[in-house]
Image: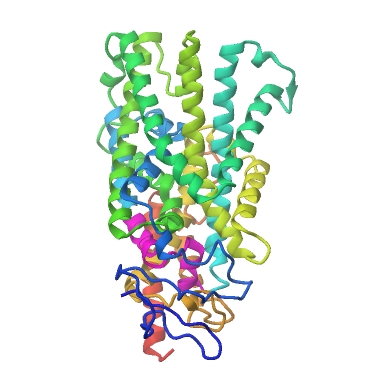
Amino acid sequence: MTATVPPTPPTPPPSPHDAIPGEAATAASDRVELAHGYAPDDARFANDDLLPVPVERRTWTTYNFAALWIGMAHNIPSWLLASGLVALGMDWKQAVFTIALANVIVLAPMLLTGHAGPKYGIPFPVLARASFGLRGANLPALIRAAVACAWFGIQTWIGGVGIFTLLGKVFGGWANAGEIGGQPWTLWLCFTLFWALELAIIYRGMDALRRFENWAAPFVLVGAVALLVWVAAKAGGFGPLLDQPSALGWGADFWPVFFPSLMGMIAFWATLSLNIPDFTRFGAGQRAQIWGQSLGLPTTMTFFALLSVFVTSGSQAVYGVAIWDPVQLVARTDNVFGLLFGLVTVLIATISVNIAANVVSPAYDLANLAPRFISFKGGALITGVVGVVIMPWKLTETPELYIFTWLGLVGGLLGTVAGILIADYWIVRRTVLDLADLYRPGGRYWYRGGWNWRAVAAFAVGGVLAVGGSHLAPGKGPFPADGLIPFLKPLADYGWAVGLASSLLLYVALTGRERRAGE
């Protein structure tokens, strides 16, 4: 039976797990909501976008979640993951294996943190209040928001370049336009229009996003398969790329590249393993989110990596060179219909991932920072502006900078936050939360001044262990060859796993010690 919370005046509401006599119960026993008529009124910690989704509005099905993942996974950076690994010396089998394993691994924290969504109807920053405190939750929320803003800029730039390239083939002369800031003004126009289109869609709300993903997912899948069929028909088979041996082998040269690459591939979706409650809060139940994500994430990413390899192999047979970028490959055709179809596919693919993965989360995270002043829509607009100002597309210039620096650093920090969330929700609280107290200063999640020092300590220690040893070869990036903290260098290749495990264990240990001390 779903627990409810009575109105606050004149007495404080009891735990949301206490049934209220005479209160209508929700049919689903594993879904909790606030009592009808009760709403937290402290504007510092609540607004309409942060409040729990009512049970009657938790309607997303298995298909909705699977379509969400298909729409998010089918994008240009996902397509280019295999090429980045091949550029590091792997053959196509090693690259696909690394990507598949990474997504099976990251699925576990995805499902664990996603559990709170259908049960309580709360977004990620509100779930983080249980472990970090009502004010402390802004720490992981802002880290997640900063990462999302950078990803938004990367995806928007890639989408804008794709549109510019394909429209240039259709109309001609675009690349020769006058330059602004070192780039043709037509490229900036494509980038700006694409940026505005993304924000216009998300500004309509989560229901609009769900409807968009429902039809975008199969469309992009058809587009990817069509590209494979087209290349195979022109090639009369596949080229020598599939027969190219690994430059690393399976011995001592392989593993030093494999483990940091695996952590980088995990980091590609580590952001979503934190804020997946932003989506699962609309789920019809645990079965929908578990099956939807399990069917949607690892299978889709592996299939997409295989498509990338096969299409690139076909391009090598046709053009004598491996073309990993699907936009550049489509641009090789002179068929106007093919170019326009490719243009629409690039548009839909990039929008579907960028809005879902990189706008929804920071919109909630920024709203959590100042609920009185920032709504979900306001947070989305701020994300759009910040994502352009920081110009993060430079991170994709080299595989070392993209996989080892950007993804490795992000993965280590986000793994640390994931470890604390999982430890608190599953080990310490056994999935039982006081829903009303997540919005009430002075309640059980207030700790000391709104901060839980145990979570902050676990994050600090886990973060240092995860990224303190970050290193790169001279001239390859911002880290010294010996590591930021030299004695932690051996841990750097396992940043996400080190961050998750160390923060989880330390948080449990600190929480247990305080409980034994009587706190």
User: In the figure, is residue 41 to the left or right of 418?
Assistant: right
Q: In the rendering, at what x and y percent does residue 168 appear?
A: 60, 15
How many dots with numbers?
0
Residue depicted at 65% across the width and 47% down the height:
386
In-front residue for pair 361/280: 280
- Can residue 340 be spotted in the picture? yes
> Which colouring convention does the figure follow?
rainbow
Q: Give the range drawn in magenta.
A: 108-133
Q: In the rendering, at what x and y percent does residue 228 appear?
A: 34, 20
- Can residue 481 be spotted in the picture? no
> Magenta region's main secondary structure?
helix
**Quadrant of the rendered image containing residue 242:** top left
In-front residue for pair 390/56: 56
Task: Please identify the quadrant where the C terminus is shown.
Answer: bottom left
Q: In the rendering, at what x and y percent does residue 220 appear?
A: 41, 30
Q: In this view, does 405 lie above or below 379?
A: above
Q: Is residue 213 above or below residue 48?
A: above
Residue depicted at 65% across the width and 44% down the height:
390
User: In the figure, is residue 189 to the left or right of 241?
Assistant: right
132 magenta-colored: yes
